[in-house]
């Protein structure tokens, strides 16, 4: 029976208790009432059930927990209550919310979130980065470190490492993997630096500086194909950027937490050689922006060592905006960071990565073909399509990325092998399907290649939950899990 033929009375049945992660609402129906029959109701504690969704809206979520609940932090919940009941009164709390968020960020990442933006692409804008560097320089003990010529200021240029993510607009859009986005690029094309051969990094950084670059934006895991930079290449980048005073910025929008450390560059194999100067963060941290690493190899040269001086610089930069970011974002991010610290998500990322990589290897895919670091996993599309137990990943050109959540249940091999992978996962998958139908939701992403599937065109499978695009599976769905089918009382 296809989903479209399910009688309406059953479609709206609210008694089933299962949910899945980031899914689209395909109808404008009201939320159905919560289940009242089962004590462990997934609608209210979804984090207690492993997810079939490794897409999470391109990695926007690291937990299915509610980060603004009292169980996470009393203050966050109190401010959230004010926000949703008497929002005009929130203005009295804006400084405290900003302070709470900054403290949580510092305690978890060890760096200072100085500049906040709507999207990480905004933070990566060369004009923003240059203004921020000018601000830091203007208030520094040694103000001449990042000398910017008039020409640099008129047309600030950045360097980027090959295969980096790029941006949705502006100069970094020249690097986008999406051809249509490249047509929107403008400004000066970034200077490209190849990190493949560590011996050739120094001369390239020297040329970038000589050609007027104000900073180099690098990635620990290359967005284009999931290749992790070698520790030796990272060392050479740090050394060269320090030597030629080229500000080193690392883009951690996707690599934070998932790669087994608060920021991926803080993994022992990288941070033993030193630290970058600025960090771009976003996505699952739930705020987007630029953090300052006061121990960065170039930032240190400014001589900003005093805690009060650092505070002044940060607040002075943020004062140009009434609110450093909207309070709802700050509170969500604050709660997420509290959870990341108290539940030690970096450690969980290592455990989850180990389990999932073993599952993939069990499908006959070689270790050398599995990219990324820890729980950030890159698979070639053809390898992803070989996985016998379909899950939704996120497309990246010829690759599919697995971006699992960090909830405790995801660290349980037993839970993953009875609910996500293996023949025993069929009852759970069928229950998830039943729940989705009850909520009039459909999986949003093709389980083959990770692209968005058009809702309402194909009907997702009731047994495996897969909803594949026409390219991955033209015509009728042939369910790989048919042989393992069982009756489920949903
Ligand atoms: Zn597909
Ligand atoms: Zn199926």
Image: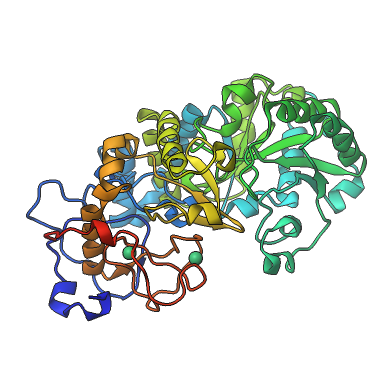
Q: Is residue 461 above or below residue 102?
A: below
Looking at the rendering, in which quadrant would you find the N terminus?
bottom left
Is residue 391 found left or right of 214 in the rendered image? left
Measured as percent of width and height from the top left, residue 189 is found at 82, 55
Looking at the rendering, in which quadrant would you find the C terminus?
bottom left
Is residue 320 found left or right of 27 in the rendered image? right
Is residue 11 found left or right of 160 in the rendered image? left
Q: Is residue 350 above or below residue 46?
A: above
Q: Residue at x 58, y 21 (%)?
A: 268
* Quarter holding residue 86: bottom left
Q: Is residue 117 above or below residue 299?
A: below
Q: Residue at x 39, y 29 (%)?
A: 344
Total residue callouts: 0
What's the image's color scheme? rainbow
* Quarter holding residue 270: top right
Q: Is residue 341 above or below residue 249?
A: above
Res. 72 visible in picture: no
Instruction: Give the residue furthest to the left.
Output: 37
Depth check: 114 or 398 in front?
Answer: 398
Measured as percent of width and height from the top left, residue 71 is found at 25, 37
Measured as percent of width and height from the top left, residue 332 is found at 40, 46
Q: Residue at x 26, y 76 (%)?
A: 2
Res. 228 visible in picture: yes
Measured as percent of width and height from the top left, residue 264 is found at 57, 33
Depth check: 16 or 152 in front?
Answer: 16
* Quarter holding residue 296: top right
């Amino acid at each position: 029976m296809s989903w479209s033929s399910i009688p309406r009375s059953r479609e709206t049945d609210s008694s089933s208790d299962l949910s899945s992660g980031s899914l689209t609402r395909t109808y404008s129906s009201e939320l159905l009432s919560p289940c009242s029959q089962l004590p462990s109701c997934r609608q209210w504690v979804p984090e207690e059930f492993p997810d079939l969704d490794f897409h999470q809206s391109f990695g926007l979520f690291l937990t299915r927990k509610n980060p603004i609940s009292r169980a996470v932090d009393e203050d966050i919940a109190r401010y959230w209550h004010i926000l949703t009941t008497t929002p005009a009164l929130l203005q009295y709390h804006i400084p405290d919310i900003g302070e709470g968020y900054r403290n949580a960020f510092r305690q978890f990442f060890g760096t200072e979130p100085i500049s906040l933006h709507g999207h990480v692409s905004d933070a990566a804008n060369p004009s923003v980065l240059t203004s921020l560097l000018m601000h830091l320089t203007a208030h520094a003990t040694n103000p001449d470190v990042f000398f910017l010529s008039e020409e640099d200021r008129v047309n600030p240029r950045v360097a980027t490492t090959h295969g980096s993510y790029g941006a949705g607009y502006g100069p970094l859009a020249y690097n986008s993997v999406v051809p249509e986005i490249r047509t929107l690029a403008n400004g000066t094309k970034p200077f490209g630096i190849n990190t493949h051969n560590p011996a050739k990094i120094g001369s390239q950084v020297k040329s970038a500086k000589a050609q007027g670059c104000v900073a180099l934006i690098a990635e620990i895991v290359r967005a284009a194909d999931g290749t992790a930079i070698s520790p030796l290449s990272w060392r050479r980048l740090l050394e060269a950027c320090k030597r030629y005073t080229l500000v080193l910025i690392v883009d951690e929008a996707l690599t934070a937490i998932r790669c087994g450390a608060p920021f991926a560059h803080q993994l022992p194999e990288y941070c033993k050689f030193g630290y970058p100067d600025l960090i771009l963060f976003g996505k699952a941290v739930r705020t987007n922006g630029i953090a300052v690493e006061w121990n960065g190899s170039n930032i240190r040269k400014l001589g900003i060592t005093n805690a009060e001086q650092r505070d002044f610089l940060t607040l002075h930069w943020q004062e140009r905006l009434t609110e450093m970011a909207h309070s709802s974002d700050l509170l969500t991010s604050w709660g997420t960071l509290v959870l990341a610290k108290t539940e030690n998500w970096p450690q969980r990322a290592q455990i989850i990565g180990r389990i999932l990589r073993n599952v993939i290897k069990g499908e006959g895919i070689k270790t050398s073909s599995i990219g990324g670091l820890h729980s950030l996993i890159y698979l070639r599309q053809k390898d992803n399509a070989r996985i016998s137990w379909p899950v939704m990943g996120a497309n990246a050109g010829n690759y599919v990325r697995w971006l699992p959540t960090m909830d405790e249940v995801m660290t349980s091999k037993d839970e993953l092998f009875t609910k996500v992978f293996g023949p025993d996962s069929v009852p759970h998958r069928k229950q998830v399907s039943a729940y989705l139908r009850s909520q009039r939701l459909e999986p949003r992403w093709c389980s083959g290649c990770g692209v968005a599937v058009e809702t309402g065109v194909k009907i997702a499978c009731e047994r495996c939950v897969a909803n594949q695009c026409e390219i991955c599976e033209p015509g009728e769905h042939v369910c790989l899990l048919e042989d393992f089918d069982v009756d489920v009382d949903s």
